[in-house]
Image (cartoon, rainbow, N blue to C red):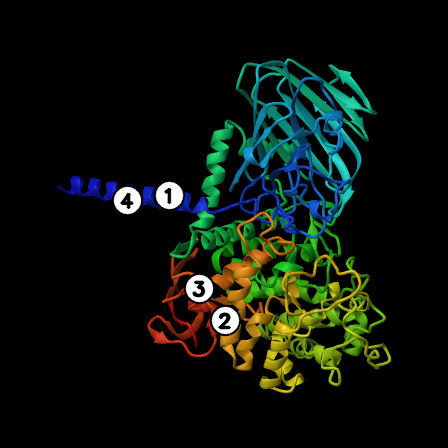
Amino acid sequence: MIKRSLLCVAALLLVVVQWGNAQTRDVARYVDPFIGTGGHGHTFPGATTPFGMIQLSPDCDTKNGAWDWCSGYHYSDSTMMGFSHNHLSGTGWADLGDILLMPTVGQIKMQPGSKQHSEEGYRSYFSHKNETAQPGYYQVFLKTYGVNAELTASQRVGFHKYTFPATNEANIIIDPVHKIFGSTFHTMVNVVDNRHIRGYCYSEGWGGKRFAYFVAEFSKPFASYGVYEQGKMIPNGNCAVAADAKAWVRFTTTKDEAIEVKVALSPVSFEGAEANFKAEADNVNFDKALSNARADWDKVFAKFEVEGGTDVQKKLFYTSVYHSFIAPNLYMDVNGDYVAAEKNMNTKWFTNYSTYSYWDGFRAEHPLLTIVDQKHTREFVNSLISRYTDRKDHLPIWELCGYDNFCMLGYHGVSLIWDAISKGVDGIDPEKAFATMKDASLTEKMSGSNGGGGLHDYIRQGYVPCEQGASVSETLEYAYDDFCVAQLAQKLGKSADAKEYTKRSLSFVNQFNPELRHFWPRYKNGQFMAPFELNDWKKLQPHWISGNIWAYDFFAPQAVDTLISLYGGKKAFEEKLDRTFTDTLKMIGEQHVDISGFVGSLGFGDEPGHQVPYLYNYAGAPAKTQKIVAYLRNTMYAPLPDGVVNNEDCGQMSAWYIFSSLGFYPVCPGKPVYDIGTPMFPKVSLHLENGKTFTIIAHNVSDKNIYVRKMKLNGEELKGWQLKHSDIMQGGVLEFFMGKSN
């Protein structure tokens, strides 16, 4: 009887597990990696795994392209030149595109050729009708060659599957010279035997000077091969080192015969690439790799269980989840080798990640991960701390491939570090964290975005003088970052530091011009710049990043009450918000590409304004927050290739949508609270790593019932307009009672 009962329980558990797997696979169908590949979204459609080192995706244009080809792909394209192994997701600048492979049929060509004359090279035509993308998988039919290409990935290995027609001239081009906007110093290829090739590329770009080593294994011995260097093909050549070294292999294939290729990368060495291959690709074929990649994504999607809502809403929500888990990226071999500040390192105490777009992501992307993925949050934070403790360098402003490219402003790495500590993420040494943060707060760095810096003047004078570029934005961002330093100092009992950095965190008041009622450029001598008309982008852009005065008028998330006082109290603050969301801009001059998605004069497509809709709560007008949040959800996102209003920015645009669909948002990362907005779905359950579940229920919610009349937390009325992080992590139920009016 006992044995029979145990069998029944086991059978029931198997059914539950199978049902759960079916549910997550059903959720994955809502994800559309093509969202953001058109317009100015700059995402890529190819195969990757959560936070993986490999983003195996097609490249259609690079050095000859415009700004919208930052990921190497744009939905407007009709030709592609092949599939490279790493890409940036939604950024406003470009690099990567390491180690490109391209299957061809017929004459071997070693240059990609132009978009206008693809027959000149190995480039192929394609159609979106014969192209698909899913989490961990990409497929396209290459019309020029009659080859079906499929891609998937593990953390450090790209898996290719090319299905050829019947031919004696089935080729695969291996091009390490290829780059997305970067420049190549030299490359090497080595045909090891009739199934293995290895090589490297040494290049320079947004990610600094760097190596990309690779080892490749083919599922079938090639019939012939050759290398290419200095513009010449060398049949049967097995090694080339040159500025343009490439390789090719040729097969005889029957109709619909598939050739698989596995390519492992390393930023450090051939030995690292081989170790990565052995760990992730030995005895793993394409189908197994695809199954593994899908399982990895299913684990991510299972964190968010949505009930109700429209298919469009779920498509946007789960695609946002997908985009939020692409970056930062693993940048470390399985043996612990990695690169930081252009130096080879090795460690065992953390797993190294890079691609830190945290000028964008500190606002919502990383706060989201403190809720649903503390494991990776810990690794991200320790990676940043190690730049000071291990590499003896400083926190980067914007890090790619371990290299600080000095893009954007501030030292927002301190926000990631403190936000994680403030929310109880374990495994972070607070003393090491504070030393790292304090060093960043004293280290002058010149922004590559606007020539600004001014940190030393900021410390001495309490603001950044307008003789420096983007001075207004710099002051406001430094002040927020100093708040983060102050909070950790206080937690550690460092009273002198806490006092100093608390004072610095209020420096934004020194940039406020009470007569103009704007944060305003101020000279070194203390005088404010004379008033000028605000309808000329050329006049704005020297003083605000992207010319974004309207967002920065509200950027003091660490001290919103002080901000309100500067504007004359809650009523005046509410009126200023009203004007911001309703006054139509009538600008002249060239608009910066990164400021877009206007609602009134607020450019929602540029991240400094992402918290602004939630500030109505502080003015005593929460219904206006709810109205504008619902409006932004419905108008700034769409299930289309151009469905992201501007650069997706490594998950930030997506994280805003996720939070704003759940019904709350982190106005001030580093304060373990969230500000209430308006929920979109009848029910969402967040399944946390600690085994607990936090459920958000929105009674009577609809596209018209967007106003919150009442809230309950675990059955008790929730007063005010904030939700504690600890309440989420303890599990429980947050109930919204919705209506057509508040």
| Whole-number angstrom distance, CA of label 3 to CA of label 4 | 38 Å
Marked residue nearer the N-terminal end (3 or 2): 2
Where is residue 683 drawn, in percent x and y?
38, 60
Q: Which residue is mark 2?
A: 626
Marked residue nearer the N-terminal end (4 or 2): 4
Q: Which residue is mark 3?
A: 703
| Whole-number angstrom distance, CA of label 4 to CA of label 1 | 12 Å
Label 4: few (<14), some or many (≥20) within 10 Å? few
Viewer-nearest residue: 313 or 206 = 313
Q: Nearer the viewer, mark 2 or mark 1?
A: 2
Q: Is residue 702 left or right of residue 224?
A: left
Viewer-nearest residue: 120 or 432 = 120
Amino acid type of the residue that numbered disc 4 sits on in the rendered structure: Leu
Amino acid type of the residue that numbered disc 1 sits on in the rendered structure: Asn
**Quadrant holding the N terminus:** top left
- Extreme residue toward the left, this view: 1
Amino acid type of the residue that numbered disc 3 sits on in the rendered structure: Asp
